[in-house]
Image (cartoon, rainbow, N blue to C red):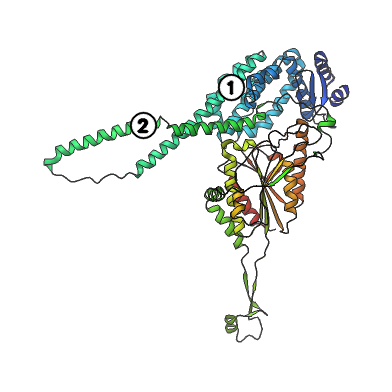
């Protein structure tokens, strides 16, 4: 422990070294090296060793990370108590953990006065890191909630530390924050026990659920009002009839009657605007649950420092050293999907409808780029009679024409589809399947070979080993390069999902198949709704680290790799070729990237 702690802190003032050493020694805390700051709240803290020549910011981050994890024990945080309240839901657990982080750091600063100035520096740095994210215009209600909750923790912590709040919310997000979270700031600052943190975290979770439900009901009401407006505009009014003076009294009575009827009708419509039909209420509930599912999958973004507590990392040798590997006795499930005769054309047609005219434009672009060209005034070739007549006084022989075939610079395209269980929410799997079916249909029409493969880690087969993957993954072959997209092949592509997300294993399966193609342009498009997931936390670290390196190597080899994150930020893995999408923008984003490839110089 001494080597890890003091070797990393040798550039930090002696008084601070003594303070952190005293803090750990008093509590009997063991400090081990690991990829991320973690604690089991039972006497062990993991933290990465600070590199040689670390910047002052990195030194401060190391110090505050170690101190923060130790504070969970001093503040008597209990993972088991929080989990007992939350069950299997990650979102309320993370909300409890987020507000509890504020509590334990506040208590720790009261006991160790010298730590406060380092927490001040840490939160100043943290604000700078988060400023752009929380100030950006939210693309969805999910992003707006995410930014507002993150801001709530930053603001209360800055208030307690007495430092300037430099992070600013987008006006739309600020409005949501003022309505839902602002009045909770004093409660977060005042909490002193873990029990209070649990109650407060669950209170925030309830606020989030209510806010999401309200938002989706408002969206349904707007749709209803728009539909009623369109209907009323479509109803024509009768032509006014001429009448003489003797009928004026009767006409006036009729007008009054019509006016009353209109008022009654308008009053009824206004009343209807406030009431949703059972179908609309059901749709609002589904949409609200979709947003909560997305928040659940991104719950680790709500904490103030690193990931959720409770890591089971045992040592650096197991968690950090060595590559991501597969046990030699593991045999993956690699199957050609059984055709479903009732779904093929349905999903293809749905996809064509989603893509609209963009799909036709994409294929016409490819065909245009490869049309034959006629070259006139050539010394040989087919006789050009017009040139011969025009040049009858010219003794040269440039009266021939030659037709040159368009450059057959074809592309090969592979699609990798995430089939993990999280793809069920908001019917992401169905929409993604429909779009892929249409894409392959269009590519097949212009002779561009394509392959579609789905992947997941069966739900009961999460890896138990930190050394290597000891459970099989599933690879579903929907279409190979050599198969035309029709008949039984088309009927294979249907929605199915289960389990985890072993991205790297799927990439290592599909890339060699794409690399073996003779086409000069090679394109890989990955559709996924979350980060890689393998089961064991130690193996997870290796998986994420090696996936980043593998994608970089594939790009260097000349394969164009696009990562489409469906309600998920995957920029860590795909870099500049990552595209954030939702179910409404996925189709247009894929077409846009495909057009870029087909319209570029190989």
Q: Which residue is mark 2?
A: 270
Q: Say few, some or many: other residues with alpha carbon within 10 Å of mark 2 (under 14 / 14 to 19 / 20 or more).
A: few
The image quadrant where one finds the C terminus is bottom right
Can residue 579 be seen in the rendering of this structure?
yes
Q: CA distance from mark 1 to mark 2?
A: 34 Å
Is residue 567 visible to us here?
A: no
Q: Quadrant of residue 70?
A: top right
Quick one: label 1 or label 2, which is nearer the N terminus? Answer: 1
Location of residue 525 with respect to 62 vertically, above or below: below
| Direction left: furthest residue | 246
Question: Considering only vertical position in the picture, is 28 above or below 558?
Answer: above
In the picture, which quadrant includes the N terminus? top right
Q: Which residue is denoted by mark 1 in the rendering?
A: 204
Q: As drawn, is 351 to the left or to the right of 127?
A: left
Above or below, 580 against 274 in this view is below
Q: Residue at x 56, y 28 (%)?
A: 174
The spot of residue 440 in percent (x, y) is: 61, 53
Viewer-side residue, 467 vs 138: 467
Q: Position of residue 99 (x, y in %)?
A: 65, 20
Residue 150 falls left or right of residue 70: left
Direction from residue 316 to residue 565 in the image, left or right: left
Q: Residues within 10 Å of mark 1 (few under 14, many from 20)?
A: some
Q: Are marks 1 and 2 in contact (CB under 8 Å)?
A: no
């Amino acid at each position: 422990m001494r080597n890890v702690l003091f070797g990393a802190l040798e550039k930090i003032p002696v008084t601070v070294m003594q303070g952190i050493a005293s803090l750990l020694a008093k509590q009997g805390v063991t400090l081990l090296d690991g990829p991320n700051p973690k604690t089991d709240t039972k006497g062990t803290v993991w933290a990465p060793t600070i590199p040689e020549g670390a910047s002052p910011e990195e030194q401060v981050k190391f110090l505050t990370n170690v101190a923060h994890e130790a504070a969970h024990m001093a503040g008597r945080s209990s993972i088991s108590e929080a989990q007992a309240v939350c069950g299997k839901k990650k979102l309320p657990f993370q909300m409890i953990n987020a507000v509890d982080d504020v509590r334990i750091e506040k208590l720790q600063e009261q006991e160790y006065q010298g730590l406060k100035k380092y927490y001040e520096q840490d939160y100043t740095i943290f604000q700078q890191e988060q400023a752009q994210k929380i100030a950006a215009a939210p693309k969805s209600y999910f992003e707006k909630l995410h930014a507002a909750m993150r801001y709530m923790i930053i603001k209360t912590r800055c208030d307690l530390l007495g430092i300037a709040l430099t992070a600013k919310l987008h006006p739309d997000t600020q409005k949501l924050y003022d309505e839902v979270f602002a009045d909770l700031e004093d409660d977060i600052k005042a909490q002193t026990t873990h029990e209070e943190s649990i109650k407060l975290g669950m209170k925030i979770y309830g606020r989030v659920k209510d806010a999401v439900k309200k938002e989706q009901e408002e969206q349904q009401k707007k749709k209803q009002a728009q539909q009623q407006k369109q209907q009323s505009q479509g109803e024509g009014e009768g032509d006014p009839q001429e009448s003489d003076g003797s009928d004026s009294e009767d006409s006036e009575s009729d007008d009054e009657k019509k006016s009353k009827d209109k008022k009654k009708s308008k009053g009824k419509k206004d009343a209807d605007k406030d009431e949703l039909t059972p179908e609309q209420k059901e749709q609002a509930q589904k949409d609200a649950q979709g947003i909560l599912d997305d928040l659940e999958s991104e719950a680790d973004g709500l904490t103030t420092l690193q990931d959720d507590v409770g890591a089971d990392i045992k040592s650096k040798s197991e968690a950090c050293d060595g590559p991501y590997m597969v046990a030699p006795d593991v045999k993956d499930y690699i199957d050609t999907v059984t055709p479903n005769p009732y779904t093929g054309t349905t999903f293809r047609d749905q996809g064509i409808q989603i893509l609209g005219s963009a799909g036709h434009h994409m294929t016409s672009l490819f065909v245009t780029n490869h049309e034959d060209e006629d070259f006139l005034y050539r010394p040989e070739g087919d006789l050009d009679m017009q040139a011969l007549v025009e040049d009858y006084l010219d003794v040269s022989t440039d009266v021939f024409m030659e037709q040159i075939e368009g450059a057959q610079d074809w592309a090969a395209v592979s699609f990798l589809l995430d089939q993990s269980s999280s793809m069920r929410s908001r019917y992401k799997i169905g929409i993604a399947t429909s779009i892929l079916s249409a894409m392959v249909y269009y590519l097949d029409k212009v002779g561009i070979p394509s392959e579609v493969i789905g992947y997941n880690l069966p739900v009961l087969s999460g890896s138990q080993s930190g050394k290597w993957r000891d459970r099989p993954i599933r690879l579903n072959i929907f279409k190979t390069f050599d198969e035309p997209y029709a008949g039984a092949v088309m009927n294979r592509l249907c929605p199915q999902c289960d389990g985890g997300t072993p991205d790297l294993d799927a990439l290592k399966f599909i890339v060699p198949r794409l690399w073996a193609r003779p086409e000069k342009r090679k394109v890989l498009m990955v559709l996924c709704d979350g980060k890689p997931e393998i089961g064991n936390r130690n193996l997870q670290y290796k998986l994420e680290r090696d996936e980043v390196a593998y994608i970089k190597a594939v790009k260097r080899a000349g394969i164009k790799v696009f990562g489409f994150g469906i309600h998920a930020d995957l920029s860590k893995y795909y870099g500049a070729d990552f595209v954030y999408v939702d179910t409404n923008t996925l189709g247009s984003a894929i077409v846009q990237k495909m057009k870029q490839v087909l319209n570029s110089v190989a």
